[in-house]
Image (cartoon, grey):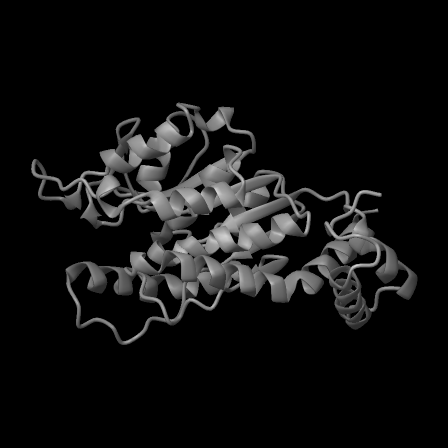
């Protein structure tokens, strides 16, 4: 039996998940017999993850991946914007969510915060982030990753969204994370690229274009809070959050499932709360597993 849930036949966890799944399936009008069998059989669907922008709140992606992995739900392709691009590339490169958590807790701010002294176009150069990604990915190009992957950036000149699928992995993530005014724009093929969250903060359509039948969107952002009394960096990030919410909500409406970790209590600049933010992603996904499985089953039936 190809079990989606790594529990034995008699475990309380499995029985509880089955009970919750059956209730969700019944709410969707699925047959009772189907509801009893599907949770432990992998649907023949290509699952794509649309991993959203959110700066420090992006650590919640790791918790989401931990929960999905425990349930046996494996992504077949990934598209990520900004923080989602950074988390997504590790998963696409073959890191387990637990290995990703280890890296996230080990990396220091100084490892990616390379102050730019030669440019007035951003506080950070971005080269340190690029180098870090390439080191962990062992120099793999985007097209050499274990899963199809796209980093979403924004063309600074045209304002168009750019879907990066080939070439230097670190540079692609650097471009997707280049918050204007914070990072110096990245240059790829003569084009200046900045943060993908400006044009596609939740890349649902992009991951569908990679071939996903079923899209799980991970929205790690939150409604902007009244925390603008801090510095320039905080003001910039909150401004981008305000601009991006309408785009995020529109994209979320086209996904099959949207997971929204409770990140409202955490500032998008609070990199000290990594472990708590990861846990928020895990808890949000655990609550949604029955709904996710029911929707997977419903979509699988329609595909037959």
Left or right, 25 with respect to 106, comes to right
Residue 191 position in % (x across, y down): 28, 33
Note whether 210 is above or below 203 in the view shown: above
Residue at image position (41%, 54%) is 58
Quarter assignment of residue 39: bottom right
The quadrant of the rendering that contains the N terminus is top right
Q: For residue 70, say whether it is visible.
A: yes
Residue at image position (7%, 38%) is 117
Residue at image position (25%, 72%) is 227
Left or right, 53 with respect to 255, comes to left
Residues 106 and 123: in front is 106
Left or right, 58 with respect to 107, comes to right
Left or right, 137 with respect to 35, comes to left
Residue 179 position in % (x across, y down): 26, 49
Residue 204 position in % (x across, y down): 53, 51
Note whether 298 is above or below 166 in the view shown: below
Residues 79 and 21: in front is 21
Note whether 274 is above or below 191 in the view shown: below
Q: How many marks?
A: 0
Q: For residue 253, say whether it is visible.
A: no
Residue at image position (72%, 49%) is 6
Residue, far bottom: 226
Note whether 179 is above or below 165 in the view shown: below
Residue 109 position in % (x across, y down): 25, 47
Residue, far right: 33
């Amino acid at each position: 039996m190809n079990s989606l849930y790594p529990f034995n036949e008699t475990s309380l966890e499995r029985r509880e998940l089955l009970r919750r799944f059956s209730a969700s399936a019944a709410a969707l009008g699925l047959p009772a017999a189907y509801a009893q069998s599907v949770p432990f059989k992998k649907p023949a669907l290509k699952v794509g993850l649309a991993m959203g922008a959110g700066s420090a709140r992006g650590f919640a992606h790791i918790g989401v991946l931990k929960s999905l992995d425990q349930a046996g739900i494996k992504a077949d392709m990934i598209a990520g914007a900004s923080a989602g691009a950074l988390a997504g590339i590790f998963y696409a490169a073959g890191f387990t969510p637990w290995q990703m958590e280890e890296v996230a807790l080990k990396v220091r701010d100084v490892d990616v915060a390379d102050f730019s002294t030669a440019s007035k176009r951003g506080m950070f150069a971005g080269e340190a982030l690029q180098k870090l990604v390439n080191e962990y990915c062992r120099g793999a190009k985007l097209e050499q990753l274990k899963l199809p992957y796209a980093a979403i950036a924004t063309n600074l000149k045209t304002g168009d969204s750019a879907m990066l699928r080939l070439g230097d992995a670190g540079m692609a993530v650097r471009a997707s994370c280049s918050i204007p005014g914070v990072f110096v724009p990245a240059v790829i093929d003569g084009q200046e690229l900045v943060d993908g969250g400006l044009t596609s903060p939740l890349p649902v359509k992009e991951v569908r274009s990679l071939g996903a039948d079923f899209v799980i969107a991970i929205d790690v952002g939150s409604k902007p809070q009244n925390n603008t009394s801090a510095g320039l960096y905080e003001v910039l990030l909150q401004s981008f959050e305000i601009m991006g919410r309408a785009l995020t909500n529109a994209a979320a409406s086209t996904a099959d499932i949207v997971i929204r970790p409770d990140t409202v209590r955490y500032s998008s600049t609070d990199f000290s709360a990594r472990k708590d933010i990861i846990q928020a992603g895990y808890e949000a996904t655990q609550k949604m597993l029955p709904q996710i499985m029911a929707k997977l089953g419903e979509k699988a039936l329609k595909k037959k």
